[in-house]
Amino acid sequence: MPTGTKPRRAGLSRRDGVSRGRSCGLTGALLVALALSACASAPPPAFDLEAARGGYGARQARRAQIAVAEPAALPLLDGDRIVVRRSDAEVAYLSGAQWSNRLPQMLQARLIASFQNASLIRAVVAPGLVADYELRSQLRRFDYDAARGVAEVEIAVQIFGAAGRIVAGKVFVATAPASGGDPAAVVAALNAASADVMRQIVLWTAPKI
C-alpha cells in the first residue's frame, strides 16, 4: 500500500448506503400503496333476501304443479345494486352495500322457497320442468324511499295455464319502515316488504290452480 494512503473500510460506501436506504423506502411506500389500493377496491358487503315463512294458516294443499319464472325487470332493477328513490323523478344506488346476486334471480329463488314453506301446492319448480301452471311476474318497484324512510316492493303477477292461457293476474304491493338510512336498516326493511309481497302471492295463487 502506498505511503500516506488510508485503507478503505469494508462494506457499503456512503453513496451505496443512501442508495440502499432510498430503495428500501420506495419498496415500503409501494407496499403501503398496494395495500391501500386493495382496501379501496374491496367490494361492498353483500346482502341476501329472505323467503316468506309462516302466516299461511291451515289450508288444504292443491295437487297441481306450478313453475315460477324469473321476474322480468327494467335495467335499473336487473342487477345487484340496491336502489334508493330520492324523489319521484330521481333514483340512485345505495352506497356501501349490494345484493349477493342479481335481484330478479334472488327473487325467483326466494319465491319458490316461499311456496315450499307454505306447503299449499304439491310441487313448485323452476321453468323447464313439467308443471301444470306457470307463474310469471314483473318487478315494478324494489327500492328504499329516502324521503319517507320506507322500503317499497311492487310485483305484477300472472298465472298461465295450458297453451299459454292466462288464468289470473294481480299486482301486489307492500311497504315497510326502515329504522335508519344505513345499509343494514335499508336491507331489513326491503326484506320485510318483499316477504310480505311473496306471502300475498302464495296465498293468492294457491286457490287459483
Image (cartoon, helix red, strand yellow):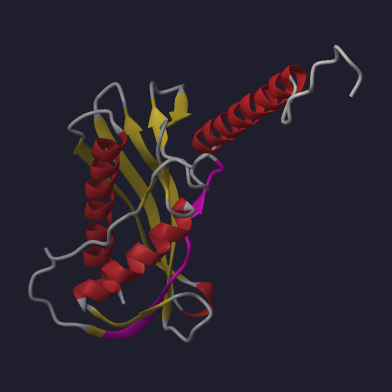
Q: Is residue 168 left or right of residue 128?
A: left
Q: Is residue 167 left or right of residue 21?
A: left
From the top left corner, tell me how far across and down residue 67 is, in percent. Answer: 43, 75
Q: Is residue 153 left or right of residue 158?
A: left
From the viewer's side, name the closer residue of 19 and 100.
Answer: 19
Q: Is 70 contained in the magenta span?
A: yes
Residue sitting at x 8%, y 70%:
57
Of all residues, the one furthest to the front in this rendering is 3
The N terminus - image quarter: top right
Q: Is 123 contained in the magenta span?
A: no
Tell me the quarter of the picture where residue 52 sits: bottom left
Q: Which residues are magenta?
A: 63-75
From the top left corner, tell me how far across and down residue 44 is, in percent. Answer: 44, 40
Residue sitting at x 48%, y 72%:
165
Of all residues, the one furthest to the top in this rendering is 4
Q: Is residue 131 left or right of residue 28?
A: left
Q: Is residue 198 above or below residue 155?
A: below
From the top left corner, tell me how far across and down residue 99 is, in percent. Answer: 42, 48
Of all residues, the one furthest to the right in this rendering is 2
The C terminus - image quarter: bottom left
Tell me the quarter of the picture where residue 6 sits: top right
Q: Is residue 88 above or below residue 44?
A: above
Residue sitting at x 29%, y 42%:
187
Tell me the quarter of the picture where residue 10 sits: top right
Identify the main secondary structure in magenta: strand
From the top left corner, tell me how far across and down residue 97 is, in percent. Answer: 40, 39
Q: Is residue 2 above or below residue 81?
A: above
Question: For the image shown, how many numbered marks are present on the structure?
Answer: 0
From the viewer's side, name the closer residue of 183 and 8.
Answer: 8
